Amino acid sequence: MADIFAEIIEWTWNGMKWLWEFVVVFLLLAIAIIILGYIVSKIVKWLVVKMLYKLRFDDFFRDTGLVETVRSIGFRGLPDILGLLIFWFVFLFFVAMTLEYLDMPNIAAFVTLIIEYLPKVFGAVLIALGGLWLGTWLSQKVEMPMKEADVPLTAETTATLIRWLVIFIAIVMALGLVGIDTTLLIWTFIILIGALGLGLAISFGIGGRDVAANVSAYSSVSKTLSIGDEIMAGEYSGTVLLVGRYATVLKKATGEQITLPNSMLVNTVITKKPK
């Protein structure tokens, strides 16, 4: 009877010892690693977000409308999104380490694949953001000189085309980085650009002749007329307010303004009142 009682005590002790060593301590250590990983991830995210806000990262994208979009879905700004990606990268590293410790190689391998994929996602986001910034910057740089030069094709249209071309290239690069086949997207874009170019060519060919004639006449009119000249051109008379690339604006004695195409002025006898 004493021997049986001793064996029961020994089995109970060994069972409790195994439970302590291989369950309690094992799991507690795993939980400790997860908690440590969460804390470290939070700290790294906080540092990155704080640094990006300090560098005024959002200011680079004010004119793109992206900041407002990000805020509408609950983020303060772009640094929060980048910080979130970094948080998950660091935290999943600790999760994979914990799974390896718990002897779960298959799940650990899957998490490791996600960790290896996240830098590509982060890089793709940066490329897309860079393309959005560059496209907006280039469109602004092109639009202003075109407005000043008063070219036939509207400055807004050209600037928009340049902006979206750069953004498209960045998106293709970003998708390629994460392993997505962009062949269909590229061909679709080529077809759209071709159709747009054909439409512009047809519309400009049909309606651009008058514009071209006015622009061509501008050189002659600008040499003949100056702002402040009092003139009579055919049935129209008044003071020259503007000699534009397409048309000239006169102010009549009644205060009304008349816009005369430059091509008409070239083919009309102009009488100037002596100053």
Image: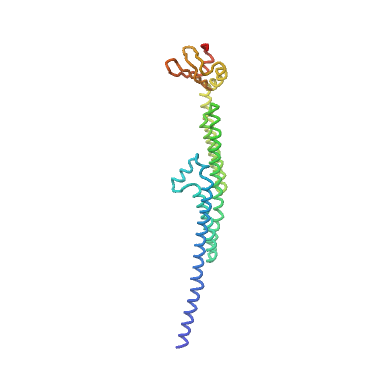
In the picture as drawn, the residue positioned furthest to the left comes out as 254
Residue drawn at x 54%, y 53% as measured from the top left: 118
Is the residue 227 above or below the residue 113 in the image? above
In the picture as drawn, the residue positioned furthest to the front comes out as 275
Task: Identify which residue, 51 or 250, lies in the foreground.
Answer: 51
Task: Identify which residue, 8 or 25, lies in the foreground.
Answer: 25
Residue 62 on image: x %, y %: 50, 41
Which of the image's four quarters has the N terminus?
bottom left
Residue 244 on image: x %, y %: 52, 22
Task: Identify which residue, 171 or 215, lies in the foreground.
Answer: 215
Task: Identify which residue, 81 or 168, lies in the foreground.
Answer: 81
- Residue 95 can be seen in this image: no
The figure's colour scheme reads rainbow
Residue 143 on image: x %, y %: 53, 32
Residue 108 on image: x %, y %: 54, 61
Image mark count: 0
Residue drawn at x 50%, y 65% as measured from the top left: 32
In the picture as drawn, the residue positioned furthest to the bottom comes out as 1
Is the residue 103 above or below the residue 169 in the image? below
Where residue 142 sits, quadrant-wise, is top right
- Residue 61 can be seen in this image: yes
- The reply, left or right, for residue 253 in relation to residue 155 is left
